[in-house]
Image (cartoon, grey):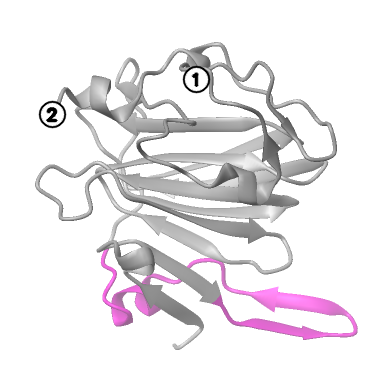
Amino acid sequence: MGQITVEKNVGGIEGLCVITPAVHGDNRGYFMETYNENDMKEAGIDITFVQDNQSMSVKGVLRGLHFQKQFPQTKLVRAIRGAVFDVAVDLRSGSKTFGKWYGVELTEENKKQFLIPRGFAHGFLVLSDTAEFVYKCDDFYHANDEGGLAWNDPEIGIDWAGYGVCGEYGGTASGDGYSLSDGTPLKLSEKDQKWSGIRDTFRFN
């Protein structure tokens, strides 16, 4: 037991946690437990995960912001190769922090994990030449259940610039004209360039 350190309610957002595992290393390499149900329960996190996913992306790829409409998922995410800037946005109805975001850099060196509860939008930006990203989910994938928000919505105000994104907001989620500070163009899927901002998506005043 005691193989993880958990920072709870990061950014003042209830439920968001950054988890750092204990790493046991010597001149041969290292060993760590990437997930231990008993440690999680001891930390007050009682979640049953049912699906693991893995993706590889190249530098400048931005995936998100994605959420599930009818079948929300808790996600436990980490980078096993390279580095990403990972972001969650609170979309829980009635939450005191609705629309607030928090981001954390996840790298193969720091081995941090980001626990994102149900009811959040999620996305990440790849900072390294390539990144392999893995995440555990507490519900299965359901086709046609994905929603999204514009990654650059000024009302949410995610600080992508703090991680090297350069460009001027043109009123849409298009990645055209955006790049990293080293000139790498931002790469978004066609779908991710068509999401609307939080105000239009949730129709609030």
- Residue 102 screen position, x and y as percent: 42, 55
Residue 173 is marked as 1
Question: Where's the C terminus, which quadrant?
Answer: top left
Task: Return the residue found at the far right.
Answer: 27
Question: Where's the N terminus, which quadrant?
Answer: bottom left
Q: Which residue is mark 2?
A: 205
- Residue 162 screen position, x and y as percent: 63, 51
Residue at 43% x, 42% y: name it.
157
Q: Is residue 77 visible?
A: yes
Q: Is residue 84 visible?
A: no
- Residue type at mark 2? Asn
| Observer-nearest of 90 and 180 | 180
- Residue 172 screen position, x and y as percent: 47, 16
- Residue type at mark 1? Ala
Image quarter of residue 175: top right
Q: Is residue 203 above or below residue 123?
A: above
Q: Which residues are magenta?
A: 21-46
Dot 1 and dot 2 residues touching (CB under 8 Å): no
